[in-house]
Image (cartoon, rainbow, N blue to C red):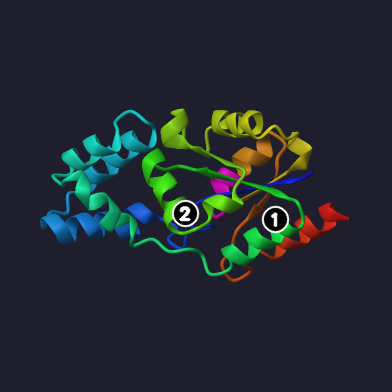
C-alpha cells in the first residue's frame, strides 16, 4: 500500500496563502482595520496551537462567530476531487499535512466534502510544530503508519518539499499548470 500526502493551502485548497489572500482582506473588510502584523502574529500562534481560535478572533477584534463566514471564502483546487477519487479507487491512502489552525482545517475538510477521502491529517495547530520543521514530517510518518518508502508528499512551497525530502520522503513541488499529473502517475505505478 502507498500513501499520498497533500498540503492543504495551494494544493487541496485553491488559495496558496490564505492569510494574505483571504484572512487579512476578510478582517480588514469586517473591522476596517488592516493591522497585518497583528493578524500574522496571532495566526502563527494559533497555527502552532499556542492560542485557541477564539483567542485568535479576540486578538483581531472580531467575534468567533465570524469564523464560518471567513472559512466559506475557501474553495477546492479544481482537480483535487478527481485526484482523491482516483486515489481511493486505486487503494492509495491520502493524508493531509498542513500549517493551519486545527479547528479551521477540520471545518474546511468537512464543509468542502473531502474528509471522507482522507485517512487522516496532521495539522500544525494540533501538534505544535509547523512545516518545514522536520518534526512535523516525523509525526506524520508515525501517525500514518507507513514506511517512508511508501510516501509521496505534494506541496506548493519548495522549502516544505525540501524538508520532507531531507528525511527520505519522495516529493513533488505542486505547480497549478501541471496539476496532479505526477501524483496520478505515481499512484498508477504503485497500484500495479
Work out which quarter of the rendered image holds the C terminus and state it.
Answer: bottom right
Q: CA distance from mark 2 to mark 1?
A: 21 Å
Residue 11 lies left or right of residue 73; in this view the side is right
Q: Which tag, 2 or 1, sits closer to the chain's start?
A: 2
The residue closer to the viewer here, 149 or 90, is 90
Residue 122 appears anywhere in the view:
yes
Kindly give the residue lying farthest to the right in the view shown.
Answer: 192
Q: For residue 102, what is the image quadrant? A: top left
Inspect the magenta stretch and tell me whether residue 183 lies in it.
Answer: no
Residue 160 among those drawn in magenta: yes
**Where does label 2 land, which residue?**
9
Residue shown at the point (45%, 58%) measured from the top left: 16
Packing grade of label 1 (10 A; few <14, some 14-19, many >=20) is: some
Q: Which residue is mark 1?
A: 88
User: In the figure, is residue 106 to the left or right of 175?
Assistant: left
Residue occupying image coordinates x 80% and y 59%: 188
Res 157 seen here:
no
Residue 20, relative to residue 103: is it above or below? below
Q: Is residue 36 left or right of residue 124?
A: left
Amino acid at each position: 500500500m502507498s500513501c499520498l500526502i497533500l498540503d492543504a493551502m495551494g494544493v487541496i485548497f485553491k488559495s496558496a496563502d490564505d492569510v494574505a489572500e483571504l484572512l487579512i482582506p476578510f478582517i480588514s473588510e469586517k473591522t476596517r482595520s488592516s493591522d497585518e502584523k497583528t493578524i500574522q502574529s496571532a495566526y502563527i500562534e494559533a497555527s502552532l496551537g499556542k492560542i485557541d481560535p477564539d483567542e485568535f478572533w479576540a486578538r483581531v477584534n472580531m467575534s468567533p462567530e465570524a469564523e464560518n463566514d471567513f472559512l466559506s471564502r475557501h474553495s477546492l483546487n479544481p482537480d483535487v476531487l478527481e485526484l482523491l477519487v482516483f486515489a481511493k479507487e486505486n487503494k492509495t491512502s491520502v493524508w493531509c499535512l498542513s500549517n493551519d489552525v486545527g479547528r479551521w482545517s477540520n471545518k474546511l475538510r468537512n464543509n468542502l466534502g473531502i474528509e471522507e477521502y482522507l485517512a487522516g491529517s496532521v495539522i500544525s495547530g494540533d501538534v505544535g510544530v509547523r512545516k518545514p520543521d522536520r518534526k512535523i514530517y516525523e509525526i506524520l510518518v508515525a501517525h500514518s503508519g507507513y514506511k517512508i518508502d511508501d510516501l509521496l508528499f505534494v506541496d506548493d512551497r519548495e522549502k516544505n518539499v525540501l524538508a520532507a525530502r531531507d528525511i527520505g520522503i519522495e516529493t513533488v513541488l505542486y505547480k497549478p499548470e501541471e496539476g496532479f499529473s505526477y501524483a496520478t502517475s505515481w499512484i498508477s505505478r504503485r497500484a500495479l
